[in-house]
Amino acid sequence: MVGTFGRALEVRGIPSQPNRLSADIEGDIVDESGVMALRSIRIRYRVALPAGKREEAERALRFHERGCPLANTLKGSVDITYAADFKEMDDPGLAG
């Protein structure tokens, strides 16, 4: 999902590399009758944004899941939640 979110940002003119996008990811594995199964994933993105790009980044966050092959594969069997911490930067190097 991180790669898909990065591409969604790039399409909106928000660079995701180098070191402008990172994520903390946690998951819950449960024992279901002696068989281990992944049931939930939580993703928290951290994004350094060029000034004035927050609205575009929030839109990318809302819609990136539908274009993600992994999210579509896991849909219905694994609960995926995500959030983002956006930090606008005045650094002209972030403009692209």
Image (cartoon, rainbow, N blue to C red):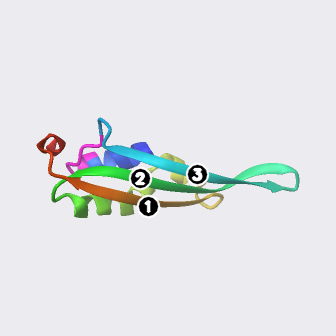
- Do residues under tags 3 and 2 come within 8 Å of each other at their CB atoms? no
Q: Which type of secondary structure does the marked residue at label 3 adopt? A: strand
**Location of mark 1 (residue):** 83
In this picture, residue 61 sits left or right of residue 39? left
Residue 90 appearing in the image? yes
Q: Nearer the viewer, residue 42 or 1?
A: 42
Q: Disc 1 marks which amino acid? A: Ala
Residue underneath mark 3? 26
Mark 3 and mark 2 lie on one chain; the one further toward the N terminus is 3
Residue 59 horizontal side relative to residue 64, left or right: left
Was residue 15 drawn as part of the magenta stretch in this picture? yes
Residue 83 vs residue 17: left or right? right
Q: Quadrant of residue 20?
A: top left
Q: Secondary structure at mark 1?
A: strand
In depth, the one of 81 and 94 nearer the eye is 94
State the image coordinates of residue 83 (x, y, percent, origin top left). 43, 61
- Farthest top residue in view: 18
Q: Horizontal and vertical percent for residue 69? A: 49, 47
CA gap between label 2 and label 1 equals 6 Å
Residue depicted at 20% across the width and 57% down the height: 53
Q: Decide: marks 2, 1 in contact (CB < 8 A)? A: yes
Q: CA distance from mark 3 to mark 2?
A: 12 Å
Q: What separation in Å lies between label 1 and label 3 (alpha carbons)?
A: 12 Å
Name the residue type under label 2: Tyr
What's drawn in magenta, residue-wise? 10-16
Q: Residues within 10 Å of mark 1 (few under 14, many from 20)?
A: some
- 17 vs 43, left or right, is left
Q: Residue furthest left?
A: 92
Task: Give the x, y percent position of residue 10.
Answer: 26, 45
**Rendered view: 10 above or below 59:** above
Q: Which residue is mark 2?
A: 45
